[in-house]
Image (spheres, grey):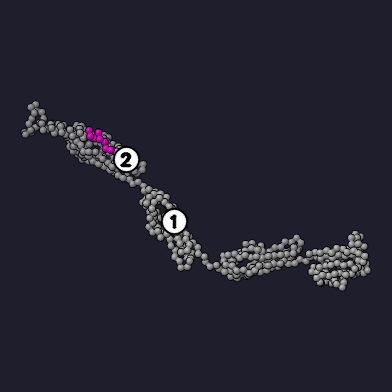
Amino acid sequence: TARTLPFHTGVDRNHQQAWMTAGGDVHLIWRHGDTADDPTGYLYSSDYGQTWSSPEFAIDTANAANHPYSLVADTQRVHALTGPLGAMQYSYRAVARPVNLTPVVNAGPDRSVSIPTAANLSGTVTDDGLPTGSTVTSSWTKMSGPGTVTFASVTSPATTATFSAAGTYVLRLTASDGALSSNDQVQVSVTVAPPTNQAPLVSAGPDRAVDQPNAASLVGTVTDDGLPAGSSLTMSWTKLSGPGNVAFANAAAVSTSATFSISGTYVLRLTASDGLLNGSDDVQVIVSAPPPINAVPVVNAGSDTSIMLPGSVLLAGTAIDDGLPTGSSLVVTWSTVSGPGAVTFTPANAATTSASFPAPGTYVARLTANDGSLTGSDEVTIVVTSTTPTPPTASSPASSSGGCGVGGLAAALMVLLISVTTHLRHLRMPTPGAADR
């Protein structure tokens, strides 16, 4: 630190006294004049090379460039300095000139660390602030070691360092004030940390959607680090939530299948254990009710009947369908299966229709219904008789008026009665729930 001693004045300026602290360069300046602050006096300086001496004061002139003068004892009391100007009166002052010192660097104590933990480096740098206006900079470098070193902040004395490989490293902290630099080193012993058991990594697979009664495929995955040594990995599937029961094909397998008692949203969990730590993951399964199954249309062609020509008969058939496939239409058709001639249906594409016959005989008519995918049918038998009288025979007595025999007339009346009765029954009693399609 620069230190300036004040001017001293007195009657005898050749015997003035001053205390000065040793350890720094000293620059002596003196002025000729009656007083220390005489503006007309002449300024003299030891920079001009004069040699000063006294019994208790020694001057070192080894540095000729700046002519520094160093005190050689801790404390010196200066008496009666005598200069080259002889007996002239003097007043004087002494200025302690500061000297730039190298920064003081401490890289901190040696360290031991295990990968992947970072080593804490507690370095310090102190400086005297010289040269004036300078800034002290610092930096860490690796001097030796088997791997690479990564510093969190290479320019900070206190920082952390990580190492790519185990071994012994020597790190250097260097500081510079712009003119002078210094450094210090620290040794870091790096070892590999023992493996740490981690919980198994579990994936229950993607969410699923399934229709009953189909089973949902569960594709899980489990990975583990093999720790603890000698342990075995176990897995299990469980139902976490859902409205019904879940049956797993193999609850201890990573990939399995599951069936569900009722529809709804289920959450299933796959858990894996290495004996110490557990890992788990969940999967959502949306279970829908089974889709409707298309059934064959239910067809009823009506009851067997009879008719006497030339009349017609009403066929009151029915066709019931489940409406599947979705968007389909039910088509019904009457057709002749057997008989002495073709039956005329009016209309032929309605479940209830009128049928007329070309000749007497026994006819079988069929009502068919088709939903676009499946076909159902039913048949009805119609007995058709003629109204023409039967010719009399030898054993058949004739009426007194020459008309038809009593037996033939009775048969015709019976057929007519059966036809009318059947026809009236169809009109009064339609099939319950039947729908003409």
Label 1 sits on a secondary structure element that is strand
- Position of residue 385 relative to residue 38, above or below, is above
Give the quarter of the image for residue 73.
bottom right
The reply, left or right, for residue 357 in relation to residue 34 is left
Nearer to the camera, 100 or 334: 100
Q: Nearer the viewer, mark 1 or mark 2?
A: 1
Nearer to the camera, 16 or 85: 16
Q: Amino acid at mark 1?
A: Arg
Badge 1 is on which residue?
269
Q: Which residues are magenta?
A: 424-432
- Position of residue 33 relative to residue 404, above or below, is below
| 128 falls in the magenta region | no
The reply, left or right, for residue 39 in relation to residue 283 is right
Where is residue 205? Give x, y as percent: 44, 56
Q: Quadrant of the N terminus?
A: bottom right
Label 2 sits on a secondary structure element that is loop
Q: Amino acid at mark 2?
A: Leu
Badge 2 is on which residue?
330
